[in-house]
Amino acid sequence: MRSSGHRAVAPPRNREEIVMANDAGPVVVMNPRSGGGKVARFRLIERAQAMGAQVRLTGPGQDVASLARAAIAEGAALLGVAGGDGTVAAVAAVAIEAGRPLVVIPAGTRNHFARDLGLNIRNPVSALTALHAGDPVPVDLGQVGSRIFINNVSFGAYADALLTPGYREAKARTFAEIAPGYLQGEQRIDAVVDTAEGPIDGPQIVLVSNNPYDLDSLRRLGHRSALDTGRLGGIVVKHPDGTPPPDLFPRLRRELRQQGHSGPPGAGVHTWTAPRITLHSTAAHLPAGIDGEPVELDLPIVCEIRPGALQVLLPRRTT
């Protein structure tokens, strides 16, 4: 799919308020704070406009989802998004709702989704070519309740860190303060997780990902080789009281070689894939991180995969 009606637009007088023209061309929603200011550093506003796109910037009273919905209401043929994974997830949810394709411009800090799409995360400008010459690729998305996730939903140490005041300003220090309690078995998640080996009660860490992560090498750890398998990836870490924390990476590599069969429930590291992963608890809510954003989720928590739900336009490969 390609958008139509492209035309160059003169730079606006006020960069914080960019008015969309009355055509059906692409609209790119940008978060100027993402990635330490990559939108400005790479001159993404001017370059997107030169490609025939209208640009909307987030700011006070201008959240990313509202801007994307307004663009659809005004006739946007496709949506683009420049920002981190949280920004991308919010615009992706609107694109699905409206049945529009999405162009992803990696302008965040880590850009995990863009990286796993095969985009050049070191040069976000290169992704702009998909606005007028993009190849459509269907990709899966995860869903938990009414929320979409493009990367993962996390519970335990990372989720608690996200919910700690000051985390954004001191990520490493906050995580270092919280993680030991989980990894030493002193803190657990107040939930039971349904896994391929059976239910696991009170784990330390749970990660549910949109398609499974590659776990067979340190170099590829945290990457996904595909975003269209139609399966969630599940990782649960639990070790018995009185035992040292599991040697995480070697254990994960061994389990992957064993095709995900990670032994009896209740101890160690468990990895599996499934179209649905559920957490139960007697508690009403559970802290979580969705694509790096802190939330409180109502229990039971059901994570599901939506195969091919999102159509992404990728830059055409040159041969």
Image (tube, rainbow, N blue to C red):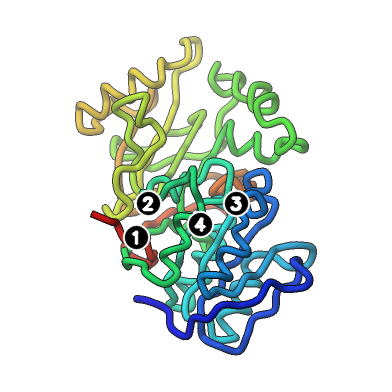
- The residue tagged 4 is 105
Q: From the image, state whether disc 3 or disc 2 is nearer to you.
A: 3
> Where's residue 164, x and y in %?
72, 36
Foreground pick, 56 / 270: 56
Q: Could you tell me which quadrant the N terminus lies in?
A: bottom left
Measure the C-alpha gap from mark 3 to mark 4: 11 Å
Measure the C-alpha gap from mark 3 to mark 1: 27 Å
Q: From the image, state whether disc 1 or disc 4 is nearer to you.
A: 4
User: Residue 42, which numbered label?
Assistant: 3
Say above or below: 252 vs 291: above
> Where's residue 305, x and y in %?
37, 57
What amino acid is found at the position of numbered circle 4 in the picture?
A: Ile
What amino acid is found at the position of numbered circle 1 in the picture?
A: Val
Q: Crowding near pointer 2: few (<14 within 10 Å), some, many (20+)?
A: some
Residue at (59% x, 78% y) in the render: 71
User: Residue 139, which numbered label?
Assistant: 1
> Where's residue 175, x and y in %?
64, 27
Q: Splitting the image into 4 quarters, where does residue 99 fall?
A: bottom left
What amino acid is found at the position of numbered circle 2 in the picture?
A: Leu
User: Residue 117, which numbered label?
Assistant: 2
Numbered disc 2: secondary structure: loop
Q: Give the residue furthest to the left.
A: 258
> Where's residue 154, x and y in %?
52, 41
Q: Splitting the image into 4 quarters, where does residue 169 fall?
A: top right
Mark 1–mark 2 CB contact (< 8 Å): yes
Measure the C-alpha gap from mark 1 to mark 2: 9 Å
Q: Could you tell me which quadrant the C terminus lies in?
A: bottom left
